[in-house]
Image: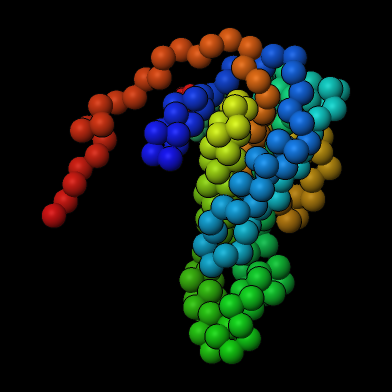
Amino acid sequence: MREQFKKTLTFRHATKSFADKKVSREDLNYILEAGHMAPSSFGVEPWKFLVVQGEVLKEKLKEASFNQAQVGNASAVIVLLTRKDLYLNDGYVEPLLRRIGDDLYENFYKAFYDGYTKPMTQEQITDWGDKQTHLAAMNMMSAAAAIGIDSCPIGGTDPVAVAELLNVDTETYVVSMLLPVGYREHEPYTKNRRPFEEVVTFID
Ligand SMILES: Cc1cc2nc3c(=O)[nH]c(=O)nc-3n(C[C@H](O)[C@H](O)[C@H](O)COP(=O)(O)O)c2cc1C
């Protein structure tokens, strides 16, 4: 498993162009399930995933993403949204927090969550959610790579234009990132990474 996972990490690369080959619904579900299983702060899953497969819409998403080819020629574009309604009083989180059990919720979790989130501005709370959505995206990229499917995280997009194209309820969500998936058209360049020793410091 150690070697297999390392191979998966090496296989994954930010794919710049996809071949004309469809990802099956079963494989898409496998990838999406990995996003669904991602960790989230207090377990409130502050995300939603839209899956775009239609050619016309993919082309429009490409145009909203600096014309990056991989958005247009992917088999599917997963659009990751982050929820903005993450304050306790917004209604969304309460039933999710209650999954811990009513007693624990009432006597501990509710005040803990409220105390943690209340001092945040709306922008800060959305950023907090958005970081977590990025974890879901990473889970999806790794899951895709594990089954031989390529992907590319796309931050280079106009989130407002994407929200408009997909009729996203912008009272509740912001567009976090796009994740085109498919099969690579070309072999990737060799991976560039800073030296391990420069990036990692062990502290006793
Ligand atoms: C938040 C984020 C946004 C990114 N946005 C883009 C993008 O818009 N277009 C693109 O081609 N790659 C994008 N990338 C991919 C990076 O350029 C890529 O991961 C990095 O250069 C390392 O290459 P590798 O993933 O192939 O190992 C993004 C990556 C992250 C984490």
**Residue 186 pos. (x, y %):** 58, 10
Q: Is residue 5 above or below residue 110?
A: above
Q: How many marks?
A: 0
The C terminus - image quarter: bottom left
Residue ID at (75%, 50%): 170
**Residue 80 pos. (x, y %):** 67, 43
Q: Nearer the viewer, residue 162 or 196?
A: 196
Q: Quadrant of residue 102?
A: bottom right
Q: Is residue 151 above or below residue 70?
A: below
Q: Is residue 88 above or below residue 187?
A: below
Q: Is residue 24 left or right of residue 178?
A: right
Extreme-left residue of the structure: 204
> Can residue 54 be seen in the rendering of this structure?
yes
The N terminus - image quarter: top left
Q: Nearer the viewer, residue 98 or 19?
A: 19
**Residue 20 pos. (x, y %):** 75, 14
Q: What's the colour scheme?
A: rainbow
Residue ID at (79%, 21%): 59
Residue ID at (67%, 17%): 18
Extreme-top residue of the structure: 186
Residue ID at (54%, 59%): 40
**Residue 47 pos. (x, y %):** 66, 53
> Can residue 62 be seen in the rendering of this structure?
no
